[in-house]
Amino acid sequence: CPKGCVGKIFCLFRFHMANTILIGMQWGDEGKGKIIDVLTANADIVVRSQGGNNAGHTVIHRGAKYVLHLIPSGILRHRKVCVIGNGVVIDPVALVAEIDGLRQLRVNIGKNLLISDCAHLVLPYHRMLDEQRELRRGRIGTTKRGIGPAYGDKAARTGLRMSDLMQPIVFSKKLQAKISENNRILQALGAKSISFRDVNEIYLAAGEKLRPYVTNTVMYLHRAMDRGKQILFEGAQGTFLDIDHGTYPYVTSSNTTAGGACTGTGVPPHRMDRVVGVMKAYSTRVGDGALPTEDAQLAQMLHNLGREFGATTGRKRRCGWFDAVAARYAGMINGIDEIAITNLDGLDQVDPIRVCVGYQLHGKRLDVPPCDATQLANCEPIYEELAGWNRSIHAARKFSQLPTAARKYVRYISELAGAKLSMVSVGPARGETIML
Ligand code: GDP
Ligand code: IMO
Ligand code: MG
């Protein structure tokens, strides 16, 4: 920072244009929504760059609970602009419902929301194909929101975009062709076919409601940066759900890692200043695929506390010990500068606490997660044990107020992950956060 302020994100002079990418370092649901809500205080714009309404980001503020699916979590703060970037796949009907739901909770949505005209649409046949695939062997355990088929159409260059929806005649023509093609596939799968007239009517109505927000968000973001505005890039899902770097095929269909923030918004890499990684103090995963440190007893304890139920589908999340092999890899491929650890209070009554520091596969030690899903599923974790703290940390607001064992634990896991610890979260609400 030209002013010599060391804390770029929290620069007192708001001088440094700290464009910050926030990334989940595990399998999603790390508490990104909560950390975004905290960091938004120092940002002007919050952008989603990938994923769709498979995401569920929880923010607790003044006792009310908000779960954001498509709209960036920054919407809850006054005078912040929220952008849904070109890399997001949008179900327009779900987005209208989300806007209406937030308005009912007295959240202001108007000029503070922008939607990319290049974002692809999720259509009913995407959802139905997703559901059909989930009925078969080799299912992924998806959220059934049509995300995979929508990104599939995008990659195949046969998708419909927000800009199509803004031109009713063009949209209807393209939709008719897509529905007749997909009805043949759905029929072959033994599923119900879709009525063009119904979908056309519902989607055009949703499109009209979204019209005021649709724009060229790439130009908006560049102009804003030129005026010195600070952008926070809100990652959805997590590193190991990334289509390239995750535990394929048990992944989502977008780049959830740091590079996705550039491609999904049109902001180039050299304008990114910081990458903040969010990780839970333990591991969770919802859906199928390997979770090397999975532990049924830990899961039961957390579920009994009413924790770790999916924010989008309500499914029970699978739980396991902190996996430093995965976290270190996430640190490396995302270029994590700073770490926010969440849900530390979830371990309040756990003693000893296990940390996975390596994997064992066929008698060999691995320090990097294998790319192959079967190999990963066969990896046995190598654990170290740390002492627990056996008391509630919920009220701690300073690092020094945490018990020694808790301080030791967070320092150790961030060291293993290879980045500086900058935040510790001890509860779901905005204030329940320790800044280092
Ligand atoms: P996201 O998808 O990464 O935004 O995470 P989710 O919202 O799906 O899941 C995280 C859950 O943990 C939510 O219920 C949050 O309210 C909650 N949460 C986040 N941080 C903390 C924390 O430090 N302590 C507790 N008790 N809950 C937290
Ligand atoms: P947030 O942003 C946790 C998982 C699904 C499934 C896989 C593929 O709240 O962290 P999809 O519907 O994307 O085709 O499902 O990815 N998944 C998530 N898990 N948090 C999420 O989002 C997720 N979004 C998708 O459970 O295993
Ligand atoms: Mg979530």
Image (cartoon, rainbow, N blue to C red):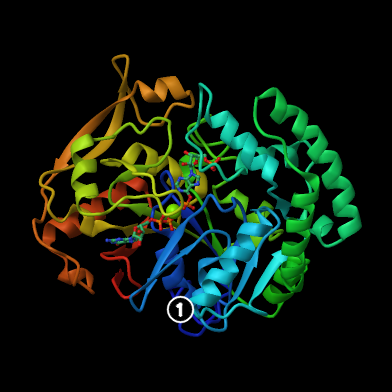
**Screen quadrant of the C terminus:** bottom left
Please name the residue shown 32% across and 41% down the image.
324
Q: Quadrant of residue 346?
A: bottom left
Give the left or right position of residue 90, taking residue 158 as reference. left
Q: Position of residue 141 (x, y in %)?
A: 47, 35
Please name the residue shown 29% across and 31% down the image.
358
Is residue 19 positioned above or below 263 on the image? below
Q: Position of residue 195 (x, y in %)?
A: 76, 43
Give the left or right position of residue 82, taking residue 291 as reference. right
Mark 1 C-beta closer than 8 Å to ligand 1: no
Is residue 337 positioned above or below 189 on the image? below
Can residue 222 be seen in the rendering of this structure? no
Q: Position of residue 95 (x, y in %)?
A: 62, 61
Pick whichever, 108 or 43, lies toward us. 108
Pick whichever, 70 or 241, lies toward us. 70
Pick whichever, 358 or 249, lies toward us. 249
Is residue 304 positioned above or below 81 on the image? above
Q: Secondary structure at mark 1?
A: loop
Is residue 191 positioned above or below 73 on the image? above
Give the left or right position of residue 118, taking residue 260 as reference. right
Pick whichever, 289 or 93, lies toward us. 93
Give the left or right position of residue 6, taking residue 108 as reference. left
Badge 1 density bin: few <14, some 14–19, many ≥20, Cα 10 Å: some
| Amino acid type shown at disc 1 | Cys
What is the number of callouts on the image? 1
Disc 1: which residue: 5
Q: Position of residue 23 (x, y in %)?
A: 48, 54
Please name the residue shown 28% across and 34% down the image.
293
